[in-house]
Image (cartoon, rainbow, N blue to C red):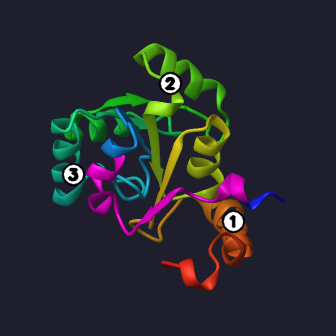
Amino acid sequence: MNYKTITPDLVFESLAQVDIETLKNRGIRCAFLDLDNTVACWKSRYVRFEARKWAQAAKEAGITLYIVTNSTKPRADEVAARLGAGCFKDVRKPGTRRLRIIMRQVGTNASHCVMIGDQLFTDVLAARRLGMLSVLVSPLSRKEWWATKVFNRTRERLVWKKVFPAEKRAR
């Protein structure tokens, strides 16, 4: 396996700690934010104050925000509205087809986008496939959809030491 495809460019403890200046310096004008356990806890409509504050600062810095989620639930629209962000559902990450369509729709390309999420095998992999900057954050909660736990988190544990050698491990 080529571990580069699941190795994030940047790692932060939470969305609130993602350095906006670093994004701006890399030419980022559009941020694709994963919903579950990145912006809000799984199945939650609540967005923490720190995430709302970060979103406001990002928008003030000229970064357009979009929730991009595999979910099809109306809750995604509610969370996006709380952040003042656009929302795209049923994105089917790590697939790239819909993300390419979204980028065309919003008038941008991968070189100006960042994907921020909590999973290597969906968020990071999708970003890397597109040549987009990828940011991994720690999950907000251990509660998740059963398939995420069984498939993605199990695979993450199996490759974690390869993706993050001891000197780079944050978690």
Q: CA distance from mark 2 to mark 3?
A: 23 Å
Tag 2 residue:
109
Q: Quadrant of residue 85?
A: top left
**Residue bearing the label numbered 3:** 54
The mark closer to the camera, 1 or 2, is 2
Asked if residue 89 can be seen in this view, the reply is: no
Residue found 55% across the figure and 31% down from its top = 90
Which numbered disc flags the more N-terminal residue, 1 or 2? 2
| Residue 10 included in the magenta stretch of the image | yes
Q: What residue is at 15 percent from the left and 37 percent from the top? A: 60
- Region rendered in magenta: 4-23
Q: What residue sits 64% from the left and 79% below the top?
A: 165
- x, y percent for residue 83: 23, 40
Disc 2 residue type (three-letter): Asn
Mark 1 to mark 2 CA distance (whole Å): 33 Å
Q: Which amino acid is tagged 3?
A: Trp
Quadrant containing the N terminus is bottom right
Does dot 3 land on a helix, a strand or a loop?
helix
